[in-house]
Amino acid sequence: MNEFVLDFERPLIELEKKIQDMKDFSSGEDIELSQEIKRLEKRAEKLRAEIFANLTPWQRVRLARHPKRPYTLDYIRLIMEEFVELHGDRRYADDRAIVAGLAKLAGRPVVVVGHQKGRDTKENLRRNFGMAHPEGYRKALRLFRLAAKFHRPVIVFIDTMGAYPGIGAEERGQAEAIATNLKVMSHLPVPIIVSIIGEGASGGALGIGVGDRILMLENAWYSVISPEGCAAILWRDRAKAPQAAEALKLTAQDLMKLGIIDVIVPEPLGGAHRDFKAVAQVLKGKILESLEEISSIPPERLVAQRINKFARMGSIVE
């Protein structure tokens, strides 16, 4: 993959490249440059802190879309054991935009479901850029029911630009598939832990996003619509996406204040793509903490709390 650099992080990337070039030159030519390298490293550390301590909502949206950011299969590989992927919805086809299967988390059997994007053009076409068709949501539904049958907690990873809006998807019942998932997930008698790891757009995210605990990575976003879609509707100008991102209150920090999510998962300075293992271990810890909090709650009360949790969202007190 070609090096991908966001405009606001370009000065930092250029400085880091200069540091690496100096290290390579010093090693290859046997020239002592340690003091100069240390000076530049301190400068880079300061610059990194300045850039990522003051990100705008639009910058976080762009960071969430970084093509090197870890995806669902990366997290499954790094925090789970014995993953067995299951395919197909038993009705139409296997949707590669949704990954689903059985695994163990810290030795505990779980069901795992998540959106999956591709790393290159070929894989993105196969994964439909993480935008699920109805059969993807019905595959997830099959796994949710399997989890209820065998009393396994459900671990969900959300990362999508939205449900696929094509004619074929609509003909096969996209809205019905998502609505059915909302109903079934709200009444599922097992713990559900949802983690928003990148993009969380509209019903495409919510179609697998009803849970007892909603975790969200620090630089992810979650909203009823993408900033570009909002800008196109309100201003008829997608270039106003930064303003839309500000108005939508889609960052983890905003959503925590609004009571939409329960936990903000910190990322390495510079974004999750800079250290897969570090962010995966932090996320694993938060998932296990959340699971521990709710595992002993009786199923009837767990379902009642989950329904009440989502019913409270959007309520207004005058």
Image: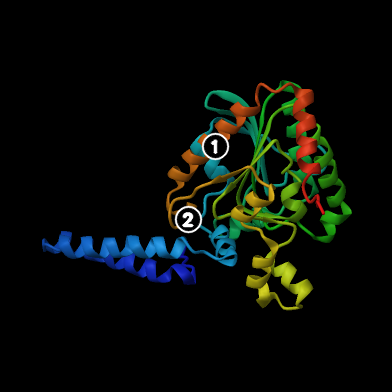
**Dot 1 corresponds to which residue?**
286
Residue 271, label in figure: 2
Q: Secondary structure beneath disc 1? A: helix
> For residue 242, what is the image quadrant?
bottom right
Question: Does the image show residue 20?
Answer: no
Q: Residues within 10 Å of mark 2 (few under 14, many from 20)?
A: many
Image quadrant in which the C terminus is located: bottom right
| Residue type (three-letter) at the residue carrying disc 2 | Gly
Question: Camera-side residue: 103 or 269?
Answer: 269
Q: Residue 283 at x, y = what percent?
A: 52, 40
Q: Is residue 154 above or below residue 14?
A: above
Which residue is drawn at the image coordinates 61% and 24% (left, top)? Answer: 109
Residue 70 located left or right of residue 300: left
In terms of secondary structure, where does tag 2 sit?
loop
Query: Which numbered disc, 1 or 2, marks the residue that appears first in the sequence?
Result: 2
The residue at the far front in this view is 318
Instruction: Provide residue 237's location: percent of width, then percent of height.
Output: 72, 78
Q: CA distance from mark 1 to mark 2?
A: 18 Å
On the picture, is 118 further left or further right than 3? right
Residue 55 is labelled as: none
Q: Amino acid at mark 1?
A: Lys
Q: Is residue 97 visible?
A: yes
Here the colouring is: rainbow
Residue 297 quadrant? top right
